[in-house]
Image (tube, rainbow, N blue to C red):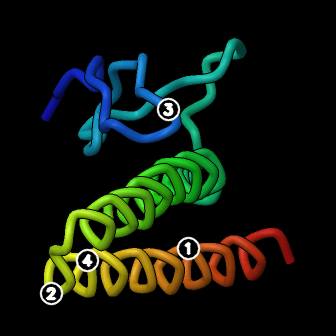
Amino acid sequence: MNHDHNHDHGGSHSHNNTHDHEHTHDHGHEDGKIMSIEEKLAVLFSHWVDHNDSHKDNFFSWAKKAEDAGLKKIAAHLEQAGALSEKVTRELKQAQKILNG
């Protein structure tokens, strides 16, 4: 499934890349070898952490904006989404650490 990330989240960054969230085929190396699951995961972990952290930052940024606008209940949910995103990043980094030995 492809989707374009050429949009601004209103935070401190914008995505300017197009990428797949699912890969249904193997990417080969220059020597024609198929990437192992470990090699694929190493690439994906890095991407997932960066991508998740960018969304986390936006959740916290918009929570502040909502709070400043008097939307306290919405701000609380956005803060919770940011906190959950931090937990997701920790889990991804733990899995990456195991992969890297």
Asked whether the beta carbons under mark 2 and mark 4 sit within 8 Å of each other, the answer is: yes
Label whose residue precedes the other's in the sequence (1 or 2)? 2
Comparing 91 with 11, the one in front is 11
Q: Specify the amino acid type for callout 1.
A: Thr
Q: Which residue is mark 2?
A: 73
Asked whether the beta carbons under mark 1 and mark 2 sit within 8 Å of each other, the answer is: no
Q: Position of residue 1 (x, y in %)?
A: 13, 35
How far apart are the alpha carbons under marks 4 and 1?
21 Å
Q: Which residue is mark 1?
A: 89
Q: Position of residue 7 (x, y in %)?
A: 26, 23
| Marks 1, 2: nearer the viewer | 2
Q: Which residue is mark 3?
A: 13
Q: Specify the amino acid type for callout 3.
A: His
Mark 2 secondary-structure assignment: helix
Q: Is residue 30 found left or right of 28 in the rendered image? A: right
Q: Which residue is mark 4?
A: 75
Label whose residue precedes the other's in the sequence (2 or 3)? 3
Label 3, residues with CA under 10 Å away: few <14, some 14-19, many ≥20? few
How far apart are the alpha carbons under marks 2 and 4?
5 Å
Label 1, residues with CA under 10 Å away: few <14, some 14-19, many ≥20? many
Q: Position of residue 70 (x, y in %)?
A: 19, 73
Mark 1 secondary-structure assignment: helix
Q: Is residue 20 above or below residue 67?
A: above
Seen as rendered, the residue at the extreme right is: 101
